[in-house]
Image: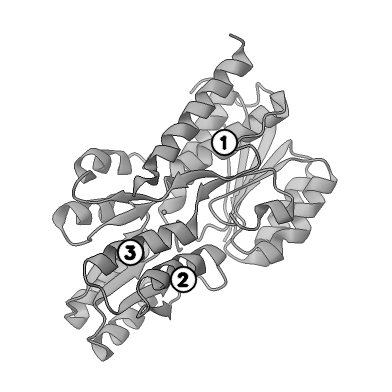
Amino acid sequence: MTLSRIRGARLLALAAVAALGLTACSEGGRQATNDNSGGGGNAAGSSGYTIAMITHETPGDTFWDKIKSGAQQAAKDEGVTLKYSNDPDASKQAVLIQNAVDSKVSGIATTLVTPDALAGSVKAATDAKIPVVGFNSGIDQYQRLGALMYFGSDENLAGSTAGKRIGEAGAKHPLCVIQAAGSVALEARCAGVKSAVPGTENLQVNGADDSSVVSTLQAKLSQDKSIDYIVTLGAPIAVDALKAMDAAASKAKLITFDLNAEVAQRIQDGKVEFSIDQQPYVQGYLAVSALYLNLKNGNDMGGGKPVLTGPSFVDKSNIDKILPFTKTNTR
């Protein structure tokens, strides 16, 4: 078997494992940073390819550590030079994509959380014959923008799945907390919850400021005691919610999207009912490896359809197995 086929088989197997998580997804909330890293197998750059990964990461959100960890491991495995950059501001993320185009990278992997704002820069990439894949956000828009492939969760499905579960548990008035304005993924999650529990109410908070999140949530919970479930859309926001719930003496139950080590521990302790995980490590890994295979061998993962990495429930039934991986940024 040739090296390309071995790598292709490995990537297909990983995608299949990700798909198995659908029995039961993120995006987080938290200046731009640059982390130029090839991530153990081959020497960075030995393939001759340079891949730019550009996200809407907000500083401080542990969710993105998992994305980067997966991308760096794929870069190591494939001998790719990985250039990571991020900015939560849509116009600045578009500039980062344009910068990658101007530097003539081999491929671009980008989140598409604000697709209309990024459309021009993505078109500049495709016009320059630079393959683009979307991941994490933009599942319904990636093809329109010209991205070849997509790796992530179906956010509408994730939201409705979460809503159905809490509805069956008796939820009547959930509060869905949106930490980043204009995010199509976050809006889709809350819409999904509301489709299952019509009494769902949305609350906008500033996810870049933890103290603001806590105070906004505390005020809402103190004012409205009918809120019986809180749905946060990122693990750091769940931690803020726990503080707000204590301060407001709220009896609401808490569920969240995404994981970090602290939230995983809170699930084990019974403070968080469950998490809807989209497996960000897998998203980062697949985005880089799929671009490598496309450049090397013309492969198209998914056959024109999104490759789903979630949603998957993490709760009391499986947290003991998953908890250790949250501490190594792989889950």
> Who comes first in sequence, dot 3 or dot 1?
1
Measured in 3D between alpha carbons, the distance from the residue under mark 3 to the one under mark 1, in whole angstroms, is 41 Å
Residue located beneath label 3 in the image: 164
Mark 2–mark 1 Cα distance, whole angstroms, equals: 37 Å
Q: Earlier in the sequence, mark 2 or mark 3?
A: 3
Three-letter amino acid code of the residue under disc 1: Ser
Q: Quadrant of the N terminus?
A: top right
Q: Residues within 10 Å of mark 1 (few under 14, many from 20)?
A: some
Q: Where is the C terminus found, in terms of image quarters?
A: top left
The crowding category of the residue bearing disc 3, from other C-alpha atoms within 10 Å (few below 14, some 14 to 19, many at least 20), is some
Instruction: Judge whether 72 appears above or below 237 on screen.
Output: above
Which amino acid, mark 3? Lys
**153 or 104, which lies in front?**
153
Q: Residue 316 — which label? A: none
Q: Which mark is residue 37?
A: 1
State left or right for residue 128 relative to residue 224.
right
Q: Is residue 10 left or right of residue 297?
A: left
Q: Residue at the location (37% across, 69% down)? A: 196
Task: Specify the quadrant of the image occupied by residue 305.
Answer: top right
- Residue hosting label 2: 191
